[in-house]
Amino acid sequence: MSIQKFIIISVTILLTLFEIGTCLRCYECTTTRHQSCADPYKKTNNYIHDCTIKDTQCGKLIIETPEGDVIVRHCFNPFINCETVIAKTNALTTNEKIKHCSSCHGDLCNGATSVSLSIFFTIVILFGTCLYYK
């Protein structure tokens, strides 16, 4: 294999695996303002939020209130995690209680289950590149 073919294949693989210049994207909504934020969640582009560079995960909270459960989907930074949120909420003397808290890493992971096709496309592009240069 020539050096030129090797460079083309390497660059193709790197560009497929990495999204350059993008931040984490999460769903951001609350059922107090958006009834469609409730479970079961139906994916919609209306609530997609580009998180800040400091945010490293997406989160979902279910807060028990006297008026009923409230669902909140949002970005989490490394200093705000489920343990911190639960501890701070339980320390307050309100009628609110965290019923559920979860966090995840990856774009739009705090909505319905999604499948990432990045690995699939990497294999397809690599296979196509190899066939092309045979």
Image (spheres, rainbow, N blue to C red):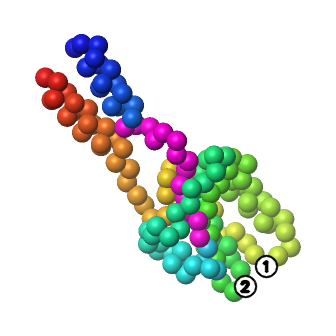
Q: Is residue 24 magenta?
A: yes
SS for callout 1: loop
User: Circle 1: is it few (<14), some (14-19), or many (20+) Cα within 10 Å?
Assistant: few
Give the image location of residue 39, x and y in percent. 50, 74
Residue that carries the numbered disc 1 in the rendered image: 95
Q: Earlier in the sequence, mark 2 or mark 1?
A: 2
Tell me which segment is drawn in magenta. Answer: 16-29
Q: Is residue 131 magenta?
A: no
Q: Is residue 78 above or below residue 103?
A: above
Q: Is residue 74 above or below residue 67?
A: above
What amino acid is at disc 1?
A: Asn
| Res 25 seen here | yes
- Which sits in the foreground, 123 or 101? 123
Residue that carries the numbered disc 2 in the rendered image: 66
- At x 22%, y 14%, the residue is 1
Q: Quadrant of residue 129?
A: top left
- Which sits in the foreground, 57 or 21? 21
| Res 60 seen here | no
- At x 71%, y 80%, the residue is 65
Q: Are marks 2 and 1 in contact (CB under 8 Å)?
A: yes
- Which sits in the foreground, 53 or 120? 53
49 horizontally vs 54: left or right: left
Give the image location of residue 102, x and y in percent. 60, 59
SS for callout 2: loop
- At x 64%, y 80%, the residue is 32
User: Circle 2: is it few (<14), some (14-19), or many (20+) Cα within 10 Å?
Assistant: few
Q: Quarter of the image containing the C terminus? A: top left
Residue placed farthest to the top in the image? 2
